Image (spheres, helix red, strand yellow):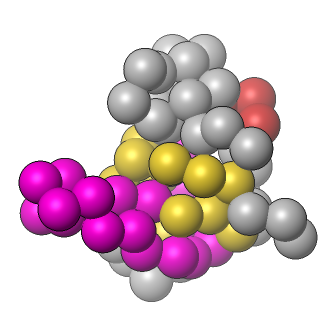
């Protein structure tokens, strides 16, 4: 599922994100959403989240639970 719609993402959702430092390479980081940092209902580059590990990035894909 697409990570650009805020309503699709909730704390506890497994996701693939791209960290700021990985944007040039497009490397994904997998984790569980702790906090949603984007306030708007959608964002073209992905909703910004904080994972339970503390890493912050934009959601590229929502994984099945």
Q: Is residue 22 left or right of residue 34?
A: left
Tell me the quarter of the picture where residue 62 sits.
bottom right
Q: Magenta residues, as a range?
A: 17-37
Query: x and y percent of residue 53 in the render?
Result: 45, 83
Q: Which quadrant is the N terminus positioned in?
A: top right
Q: Is residue 25 visible?
A: yes
Query: x and y percent of residue 35 in the render?
Result: 55, 55
Identify which residue is drawn at 34% across, 58% down: 18
Most distant residue in the front direction: 25
Is residue 29 rendered magenta in the image?
yes
Q: Is residue 54 left or right of residue 26?
A: right
Q: Is residue 55 left or right of residue 23?
A: right
In the displayed structure, would residue 22 be above or below residue 31?
A: above
Q: Which quadrant is the C terminus positioned in?
A: bottom right
Is residue 54 rendered magenta in the image?
no
Identify which residue is drawn at 50% across, 49% down: 59
Identify which residue is drawn at 40% across, 47% down: 58
Tell me the quarter of the picture where residue 50 sits.
bottom left
Task: Give the mark count.
Answer: 0
Query: x and y percent of residue 57 in the render?
Result: 35, 55
In the displayed structure, would residue 29 be above or below residue 38?
A: below
Query: x and y percent of residue 8 in the render?
Result: 76, 37
In the displayed structure, would residue 5 be above or below residue 13?
A: above
Q: Is residue 23 left or right of residue 30?
A: left
**Front in this rendered view, residue 49 or 24:** 24
């Amino acid at each position: 599922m697409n990570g650009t719609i805020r309503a699709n993402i909730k704390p506890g959702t497994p996701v693939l994100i791209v960290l700021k430092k990985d944007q040039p390479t497009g490397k994904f980081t997998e984790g569980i959403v702790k906090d949603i940092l984007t306030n708007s209902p959608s964002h073209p580059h992905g909703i910004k989240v904080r994972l339970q590990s503390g890493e912050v990035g934009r959601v590229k894909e929502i994984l099945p639970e």
